[in-house]
């Protein structure tokens, strides 16, 4: 009975509490609204747009609607039939009357399938001016390339509005005339991905080896010394990345201070090549990334109770054992955070490799940038970006476990 | 892309203050912009009352495409590479330019007038070396690709154009056959065969500044230097460099108008104003680059004009060829570099 009374009394109170909580939630949501809208507009929408571009394939069917429809029935014959040639002439004449981007975009897209297709499409309106029936004969007379099946197969392959072409290219694959998937003649992207991940691993490992003792030192010395050391760690943050990278070019060049010092000390006879190769990129990248490793380690190490190490020693543990079993596990969280940060940032970095490395040392992000702005192949750069995004998310998910394990200790 | 967006947003913000009679011109920046201002822009503003706003870009045609696709055209006139003008034209992101205003077309050099672009000054890339360090340089193009006879590192442009043409020239291909050979099924293999013996001795430059710094730092013995940078080093920085005019490929700095540019008419007025032989010739002196107009040559400072020997064996670059092959060549080149 008493219990029931209590619960009856608490019900309005709980409801009131619920109302207050709901209001608080609404207020905080309202306060978050600008952020959510901005994230949606500036982050989610461009990302979705980018992902869509990697499969978007409207160019060919827009410029050649009847041709691609007619080509559906073309199977084994060496060349498509008269109907397809007539449709082609019809489509080209219709497209020439529209905005020039219609034919131009189709030309660019088809040029990715067959080198030189661009000029075949762009010259077509002019060359088709006088063609008449029978179209098959006159079109081939106007430009003999229309007598080669590879161009027609490329048209046929691109009848759909969506394509796997860019993703296949990103994995160094392509479709042959009979639609089977084979490796391309010039595989590059897989090796670039492998090199990017390898580079991320090398830079991360070097950063960890250098940053671990440094962060420990920062955590144990007197506050005054620590603040001076911290200044040097943070200094690169306040310097422009271009300035830092150019300084490395000066330091690493053939007759630069590093080579002169090494020669003067007698360690080497001839100057070493440290610039425009992988060694240079790794040296400069480690320097750029170091603070991202030192800071998380430092913040964790400061929280480590020194008494625990003393306790380990007093119980007869060897220095190595004490470090391995007592100190190291307590810094797992910092290692996890630092490794994740440095690894992900390194893979996505491209200014330093571009300035210090050779073209073959570019990381995947640099390749994406050049496909976006130089080659204007936004489909391929979108596909590469999507793959990079997935790789990074997967790595992040697997590395996250380490951080959680670290916290459990 | 990020830089394109930044430029684009910056333009949009300052765009709020547009006056009615405005012209927004985007150039290479630096001394190019200074000379243009001094020789053309100031007079143009005085004469027409049109307010000119100058801006700089990194010659990434993606910026123009992003602008036109978004329907937010924030610049009216660009100067850039001719193949970008050709590719952008066929994609429909540039306005066709009626060359009627130029008058007599026989006065224009071959390759300087495109469907959507007007070339103003010649550019080329030549091999340069430091005379103090390299007393016995090659006298012909073959020598620069002959690593046994002329040892030492080379800095070549990784942008492919001119590098590939020169490799074929060194292999004995005559000028009028270069693009026929390059476009043939094993044309690229022939280029790679020339480059293969010196592969580990090549420093590939992309930001063009590296073509100069690799030579000043003695990182390389020979460098392919864009001609304006070469003359800047020799005339302004007093470098003791030399180059050869034995054979070279050239193109024109080309001006173009993005599709639906808000001040298209003003852009056309400006082109007409700049293309007057006297102004074009004066600019040619500043840029140390011959003008695209034959009648403008006599207005170029003869002392400067005499430093360049364009008469020997020049080859016009095939703009359409590069617009068609850039993508597939890029992949094959990258694959070869990684072998």
Image (cartoon, rainbow, N blue to C red):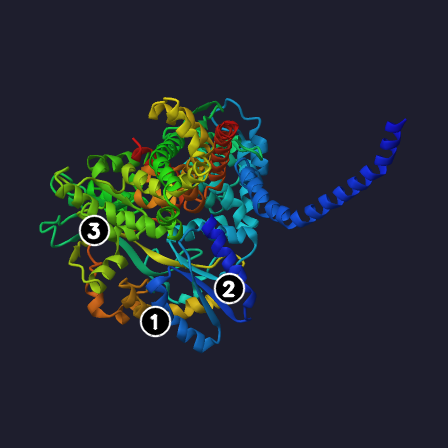
- As drawn, A309 above or below B290: above
Return the residue at label 2. B264
Callout 1: chain: B
Name the element at disc 2: helix
Instruction: Tell me, yes or no, if residue A15 can be seen here.
Output: yes
Q: In the image shown, does A289 or A62 lie closer to the viewer?
A: A289
Q: Residues within 10 Å of mark 3 (few under 14, many from 20)?
A: some
Do residues under tags 3 and 2 come within 8 Å of each other at their CB atoms? no
| Mark closest to the chain's N terminus, 1 or 3 | 3
Q: Residues within 10 Å of mark 1 (few under 14, many from 20)?
A: some
* Front of the two marks 3 and 2: 3
Query: Real-space Cα distance between discs 1 and 2?
Result: 21 Å
| Mark closest to the chain's N terminus, 1 or 2 | 2
Q: Position of residue A299 (x, y in %)?
A: 45, 40
Return the residue at label 1. B279
Residue at left 13%, top 48%? B138
Q: How many marks?
A: 3
Horizontal side, residue B258 vs residue B170: left or right: right
Q: Position of residue B15 (x, y in %)?
A: 54, 64
Residue at left 79%, top 42%? A19
């Amino acid at each position: 009975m008493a219990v029931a009374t209590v619960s009856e009394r608490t019900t309005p109170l709980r409801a009131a509490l619920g109302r207050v909580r709901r209001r608080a939630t609404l207020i905080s949501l309202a306060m978050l609204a600008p952020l959510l809208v901005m994230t949606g507009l500036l982050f989610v929408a461009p990302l979705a747009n980018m992902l869509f571009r990697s499969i978007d394939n409207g160019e060919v069917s827009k410029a050649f609607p009847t041709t691609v429809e007619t080509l559906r029935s073309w199977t084994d014959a060496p060349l498509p039939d008269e109907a397809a040639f007539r449709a082609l002439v019809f489509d080209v004449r219709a497209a020439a009357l529209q905005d020039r981007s219609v034919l131009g975009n189709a030309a660019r897209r088809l040029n990715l399938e067959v080198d030189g297709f661009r000029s075949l499409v762009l010259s077509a309106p002019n060359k088709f001016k006088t063609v008449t029936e029978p179209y098959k004969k006159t079109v081939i007379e106007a430009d003999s390339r229309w007598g080669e099946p590879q161009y027609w197969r490329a048209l046929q392959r691109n009848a759909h509005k969506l394509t796997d072409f860019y993703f296949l290219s990103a994995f160094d694959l392509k479709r042959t005339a009979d639609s089977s998937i084979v490796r391309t003649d010039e595989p590059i992207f897989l090796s670039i991905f492998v090199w990017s991940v390898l580079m991320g691993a090398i830079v991360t490992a070097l950063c960890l080896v250098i940053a671990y003792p440094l962060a420990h030192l920062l955590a144990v010395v007197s506050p005054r010394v620590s603040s001076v050391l911290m200044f040097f760690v943070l200094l690169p943050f306040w310097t422009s990345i271009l300035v830092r990278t150019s300084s490395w070019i000066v330091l690493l060049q053939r007759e630069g201070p590093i080579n002169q010092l090494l020669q003067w000390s007698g360690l080497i006879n001839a100057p070493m090549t440290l610039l425009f190769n992988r060694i240079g990129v790794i040296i400069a990248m480690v320097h750029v990334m170091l603070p991202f490793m030192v800071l998380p380690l430092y913040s964790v190490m400061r929280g480590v109770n020194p008494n625990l190490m003393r306790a380990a020693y007093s119980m007869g543990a060897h220095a190595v054992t004490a470090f391995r079993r007592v100190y190291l596990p307590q810094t797992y969280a910092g290692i996890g955070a630092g490794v994740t940060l440095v690894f992900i940032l390194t893979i996505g970095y491209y200014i330093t490799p571009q300035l210090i490395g050779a073209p073959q040392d570019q990381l995947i992000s640099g390749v994406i940038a050049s496909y976006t702005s130089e080659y204007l192949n936004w489909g391929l750069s979108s596909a590469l970006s999507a793959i990079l995004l997935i790789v990074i998310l997967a790595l992040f998910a697997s590395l996250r476990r380490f951080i959680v394990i670290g916290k459990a200790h | 892309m990020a830089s394109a967006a930044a430029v684009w947003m910056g333009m949009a913000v300052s765009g709020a203050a547009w006056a009615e009679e405005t012209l927004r011109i985007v150039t290479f920046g630096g001394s190019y912009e200074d000379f243009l201002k001094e020789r053309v822009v100031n007079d143009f503003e005085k004469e027409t009352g049109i307010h000119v706003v100058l801006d700089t870009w990194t010659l990434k045609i993606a910026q123009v495409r992003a602008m036109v696709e978004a329907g937010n055209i924030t610049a009216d006139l660009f100067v850039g590479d001719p193949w970008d003008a050709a590719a952008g034209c066929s994609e429909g992101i540039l306005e066709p330019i009626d060359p009627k205003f130029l008058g007599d077309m026989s006065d224009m050099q071959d390759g300087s007038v495109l469907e959507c672009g007007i070339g103003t000054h010649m550019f080329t890339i030549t091999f340069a070396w430091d005379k103090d360090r390299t007393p016995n340089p090659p006298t012909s193009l073959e020598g620069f690709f002959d690593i046994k006879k002329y040892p030492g590192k080379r800095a070549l442009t990784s942008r492919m154009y001119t590098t590939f043409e020169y490799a074929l020239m060194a292999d004995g291909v005559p000028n009028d056959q270069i693009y026929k050979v390059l476009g043939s099924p094993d044309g690229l293999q022939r280029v790679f065969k020339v480059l293969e013996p010196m592969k580990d001795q090549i420093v590939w430059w992309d930001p063009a500044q590296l073509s100069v710094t690799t030579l000043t730092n003695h990182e390389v013995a020979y460098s392919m230097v864009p001609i304006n940078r070469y003359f800047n080093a020799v005339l302004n920085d007093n470098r003791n460099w030399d180059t050869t005019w034995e054979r070279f490929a050239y193109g024109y700095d080309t001006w173009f108008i993005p599709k639906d540019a808000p001040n298209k008419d003003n852009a056309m007025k400006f082109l007409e104003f700049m293309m007057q032989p006297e102004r074009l010739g004066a600019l040619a002196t500043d840029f140390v680059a011959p003008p695209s107009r034959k009648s403008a040559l006599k207005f170029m400072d003869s002392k400067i004009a005499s430093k360049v020997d364009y008469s020997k064996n020049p080859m016009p670059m095939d703009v359409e060829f590069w617009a068609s092959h850039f993508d597939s060549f890029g992949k094959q080149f990258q694959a070869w570099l990684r072998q």
